[in-house]
Amino acid sequence: GAVVSQHPSRVICKSGTSVKIECRSLDFQATTMFWYRQFPKQSLMLMATSNEGSKATYEQGVEKDKFLINHASLTLSTLTVTSAHPEDSSFYICSASKPGKNTEAFFGQGTRLTVV
Amino acid sequence: DAKTTQPPSMDCAEGRAANLPCNHSTISGNEYVYWYRQIHSQGPQYIIHGLKNNETNEMASLIITEDRKSSTLILPHATLRDTAVYYCIVRVAFAYTNAGKSTFGDGTTLTVKP
């Protein structure tokens, strides 16, 4: 089946630095990918929609200059957390789906970001 | 997307059937019911989806009431590895490009006990 892969699965960074998370669709092309954030004991919250070849669309309350999204190819979207702070520590998850109507979403394994 | 209501937690004995309910009383005619689960510290995993007919696959069965206002996910023989948070999501039949966009509620934490 379709697989969406994220890298890295876990990252620790210092406050003030930037971190890049990659999301790849391994056996299909994804013109659209989605980025979610999940804080401990909470549900997934949609952050943004990543569109291949165009600007990302951000959900209300998500700072576009802080969470930079690049979708330069049909199989890769990247999320860069800029000037990370401890409150950005979270579980970041991407998703995409294969061509077809009413298809299911495939999610990456997630990236655990810890900002110290 | 229609709002869903799920019990926050449920227990199930290993080997028994796990029946997870979901209420979606405001569901529209063109909205599907999807179920995903999230095992601790992993990304969500698709389980099953349906419109109005009952559905079954190798993982589970989905029973949707005739009025479509509620549904039940059935894991026929729960194992310890089925311990996870189960999310019921209702959404319109997107073109595939938007299928990855979902509104997640709080889900049901299913604990399968030996």
Image (cartoon, coloured by chain):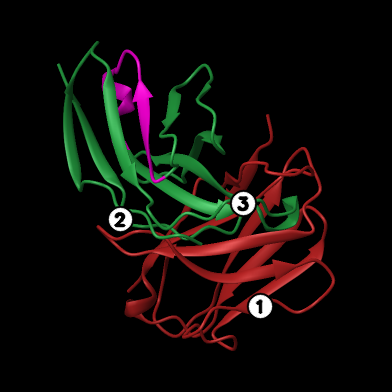
* In-image side of B87 versus A42 (left or right): right
* Residue toward you, A64 or A84: A64
Q: Chain of mark 3?
A: B
Locate the N terminus of chain A by quadrant: top right
- Mark 3 lies on a secondary structure that is loop
* In-image side of A77 versus A112 (left or right): right
| Crowding at mark 2 (Cα within 10 Å: few <14, some 14-19, many 20+) | some
Using the rendered image, report if marks 1 and 2 lie on a common chain.
no
Give the mark, 3 or 2, whose residue is nearer the N terminus. 3
Marks 3 and 2 in Cβ contact (< 8 Å): no
Res B91 → quadrant = bottom right
B70 drawn magenta: yes
Marks 3 and 1 in Cβ contact (< 8 Å): no
- Mark 1 lies on a secondary structure that is strand
For disc 3, the marked residue is B30
* Residue toward you, B33 or B58: B33
Q: Which chain is red?
A: A
Residue at x 65%, y 52% (from the top left corner): B99
Residue at x 45%, y 40% (from the top left corner): B36
For disc 1, the marked residue is A57
Using the rendered image, report if marks 3 and 1 lie on a common chain.
no
| Crowding at mark 3 (Cα within 10 Å: few <14, some 14-19, many 20+) | few
Q: Amino acid at mark 2?
A: Asp
Locate the C terminus of chain A by quadrant: bottom left
Q: Amino acid at mark 1?
A: Thr
Residue A110: horizontal and vertical position, in percent?
A: 48, 51
Magenta residues span: B69-84
Give the color of chain B as drawn: green
Using the rendered image, report if marks 3 and 2 lie on a common chain.
yes
* Residue toward you, B33 or A77: B33
For disc 2, the marked residue is B106
